[in-house]
Image (tube, rainbow, N blue to C red):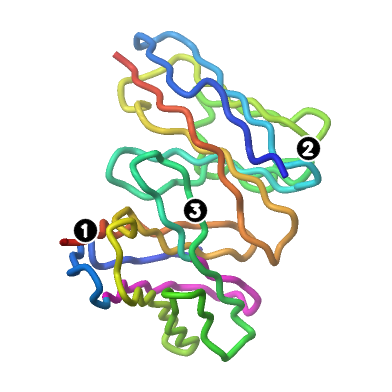
Amino acid sequence: EAGVAQSPRYKIIEKRQSVAFWCNPISGHATLYWYQQILGQGPKLLIQFQNNGVVDDSQLPKDRFSAERLKGVDSTLKIQPAKLEDSAVYLCASRYQGNTEAFFGQGTRLTVV
Amino acid sequence: AQTVTQSQPEMSVQEAETVTLSCTYDTSESDYYLFWYKQPPSRQMILVIRQEAYKQQNATENRFSVNFQKAAKSFSLKISDSQLGDAAMYFCAYAGNQFYFGTGTSLTVIP
């Protein structure tokens, strides 16, 4: 079974630029999560999708972050414009149903300079 | 809102010894799951063990076991016969309607 795919693995941008991350979940997994993990901290949930609908985006900074999951499969997370404090690893995870664990991609390390 | 607390930022253990990592959580939900994930420097989150809240029996997976105290909302991880490969960040996670993580415990294994 293929795992959760994320790209790119690394990205360096200047502040005020825009960036996009892509995630392809495990086939058949209805739930998809985006997390932000700042160095030395635990993952912080940014947004949760159930199929192509948003379940929870309460911690997503909506003035600069956006996410979509067209057709309920892969997803993109965008930051525009980026700030220095956005430097972090962005993790994507997917889950089959409510009583199973979440499976994670390898993450995208974003550095904003 | 659900919260997950890991009060031990760092722990160390001698190789072959036993170590226990602590986790407490707060929730008003009755149906939920708890997990321990391991995150090595590669950043890949790896599931270590999971516990269904409706089960009284503590989960075990080889050298890993949990002590789940539902009334106290406590979910600790015990690693027996620690190995050098166990060194990593360990995150406790709560899964109900959302999926939340604690702040993590960095485990060092001393040869």
Tag 2: amino acid: Asn
Magenta region: which residues?
B19-35
Q: Residue at x 32, y 53 (%)?
A: B88
Q: Secondary structure at mark 1?
A: strand
Residue B24 painted magenta? yes
On screen, residue B15 versus residue B36, left or right, reads: left
Disc 1 designates what residue? B108
Instruction: Measure the C-alpha gap from mark 1 to mark 3.
Output: 17 Å
Chain label for disc 2: A
**Residue B23 sits above or below residue B70 on the image:** above
Q: Residues within 10 Å of mark 2 (few under 14, many from 20)?
A: some
Chain label for disc 1: B
Tag 1: amino acid: Thr
User: How many badges with numbers are in the image?
Assistant: 3
Disc 2 designates what residue? A52
Residue A62: assigned label: none
Instruction: Measure the C-alpha gap from mark 1 to mark 2.
Output: 41 Å
Labels 1 and 2 within one chain: no
Q: Secondary structure at mark 2?
A: loop
Q: Secondary structure at mark 3?
A: strand
Which of the two discs, 3 and 2, sits closer to the camera? 3
Labels 1 and 3 within one chain: yes
Q: Residue at x 42, y 84 (%)?
A: B67
